[in-house]
Amino acid sequence: HGMNASTFTARVVASTGSTVVACVEAALGALQGPLHGGAPGPALEALLRLVAEGTPDTLDARTRAWVREEVAAGRRIMGFGHRVYRVRDPRADVLGAAAERLLAGSSLLHDARVHERAVLETLAELKPGRPLATNVEFYTALLLHGLGLPPELFTAVFAMGRVAGWTAHIAEQVAEGRLIRPRAAYVGAEGRVLPT
């Protein structure tokens, strides 16, 4: 499914001759962003906030209204959509099954299913032709919460699973011995004059 932002960051830093520690630190910086590994916390917080705002029988309507507000404001719905996948993230199926085993019979699992269905249906209505499916972060959030971890530790736990892969990529990049230097093109206004 391609190389994610944190792995690419680790490789770019490795290509400069930096230490493994510096490469992993850089990868952590990229992973922390909410558009990469930092999404599970906000995904869970949105679900829990919507659950707390009313009764279970109105969760569907509250979720749909919230999605409309977020989309109208130009914000992303964390836990849904993926930069590469245009179908449901296959990892979400695996983590969803694990969440079902861990949270079997709980109100949180029921609420998460209601929330997920309402989000998906509302996104399909608001963004026809742009498939935004459940991604790995949605069920990662449920699993980590079900294990008793606070949202502020979600990214750190996610990173623990990435370190081995990052270090393998770092070693591969070091062995290659080539500087990664992407080309870029200026896209701003032409004919600008510097102030004197």
Image (cartoon, rainbow, N blue to C red):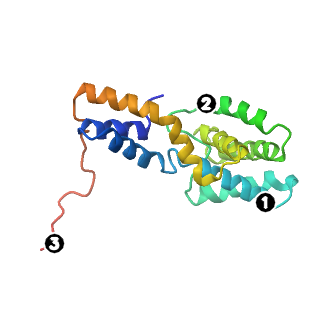
Q: CA distance from mark 3 to mark 1?
A: 54 Å
Q: What is the quadrant of residue 86 in the picture? A: top right
Residue type at mark 2 is Arg
Picture coordinates of residue 137, whole percent (x, y): 60, 42
- N-term-proximal mark, 2 vs 1: 1
Residue at 56% over, 43% down: 157
- N-term-proximal mark, 2 vs 3: 2
On screen, residue 194 versus residue 107, left or right, reads: left
Picture coordinates of residue 121, whole percent (x, y): 72, 43
Residue type at mark 3 is Pro
Element under label 2?
Answer: helix
Residue at 12% over, 74% down: 196
Q: Which mark is residue 91?
A: 2
On screen, residue 38 versus residue 142, left or right, reads: left
Q: CA distance from mark 2 to mark 3?
A: 52 Å
Q: Say above or below: 59 vs 31.
A: below
Element under label 1?
Answer: helix
